[in-house]
Amino acid sequence: MGPIHETLGSLLSTSAVTITYVFLASTMFSIGLAVTVDEFFTALRDLKLMGRIVLANILLVPILGMLLVKLFPLSADTRIAILLLAITPGGMQAIQFTAKVRGAVSFAAAVTFLLSIIGVLASPLLADLILPLETRVRFPWLHAMGYVLLFLLLPLLVGFAVRYGKRRLAEGLGKPVLLLSNISFVATIALSMAVRGTAIRAIGWAGLGAMAFLIVSSMAIGWWLGGPDQGKRQVSAVATSMRNAAVCLLIAVTSFPGRGVETAVVSFMALMVPPNMLLTLYRGLRTRRRPS
């Protein structure tokens, strides 16, 4: 596993991490410029729908992960990685796809924020329940919470403030900030392409199959529990399938150094983007063809 760990270092290099932070902050800032505080909290107050999404993410997907590690012939490290991913919702890259769902921008922001907080709070408890008894996880509480607050909440609040105080400025900033978000997302994918390809080759076909099944099945669960509105269903499907790989990678590096857990997590990061991109493109085409 030596070469893969050297390559993983490039994923965590200053440039790649910085561009990822730029993507997250600019995306949340652009959402804050586009929606109001009332719209955001109205989405959060839909307790029935939010409850179903939380149920999907902290109960159904973890159960799915437990089944998959029994059904597929996986290495111990890949099993740990899949279980970590299954119990950790709130993948922030989901916002790149959910923020483009017509009529559901405030809902997308609310779901991303809620699942990110729940992922940080619930994952350590779930880890004690479903990980092997001999496995002990050191959870980076401060790092994970700082990540959510600094790159999710703060840019969103700044966007809200600009929209509230300077509506014309918010309208002028909207497109340039959204363009920055799109460019930084593409740059993030491009910079990490080599390491992700190496990681995918390292975990084998069984690992790839288990992860693909986890992604697609989680997407189906999210769609099923996303309510009658098609846009909100799409947001729920994407947010449920894109697990919080960043937090899982932090756990892997701190709790399982020098092993293959982080390799499997990086593989998942690569695999979860294409299905959600395809769903976003398909739903976008369906929406455009629908008569107004």
Image: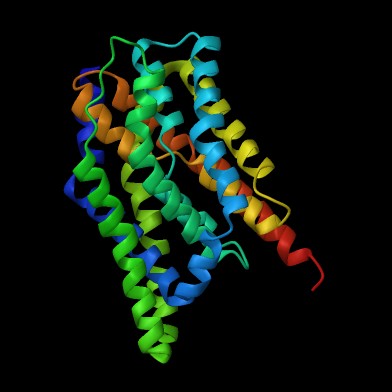
Q: Is residue 64 above or below residue 27?
A: above
Q: Quadrant of the N terminus?
A: top left
Residue at (32%, 40%) from the top-left corner? 246
Give the side of residue 284 with respect to residue 87, left or right: right
Instruction: Find residue 87 and report its horizontal and vertical position in percent.
Output: 43, 31
Q: Is residue 165 above or below residue 127?
A: below
Residue at (19%, 28%) from the top-left corner? 254
User: Between 216 and 141, which is closer to the camera in this rendering?
Assistant: 141
Visual colour scheme: rainbow
Q: In which quarter of the view is residue 156 placed?
A: bottom left
Q: Quadrant of the C terminus?
A: bottom right
How many numbered tags mark residues here?
0
Residue at (50%, 18%) from the top-left corner? 66
| Residue 193 visible | no
User: Between 291 and 46, which is closer to the camera in this rendering?
Assistant: 46
Instruction: Find residue 20 and report its horizontal and vertical position in percent.
Output: 30, 53
Give the side of residue 12 with respect to residue 175, left or right: left
Instruction: Find residue 98 and report its horizontal and vertical position in percent.
Output: 53, 56
| Residue 18 visible | yes
Instruction: Find residue 122 and report its horizontal and vertical position in percent.
Output: 38, 36
Q: Is residue 16 above or below residue 199?
A: below
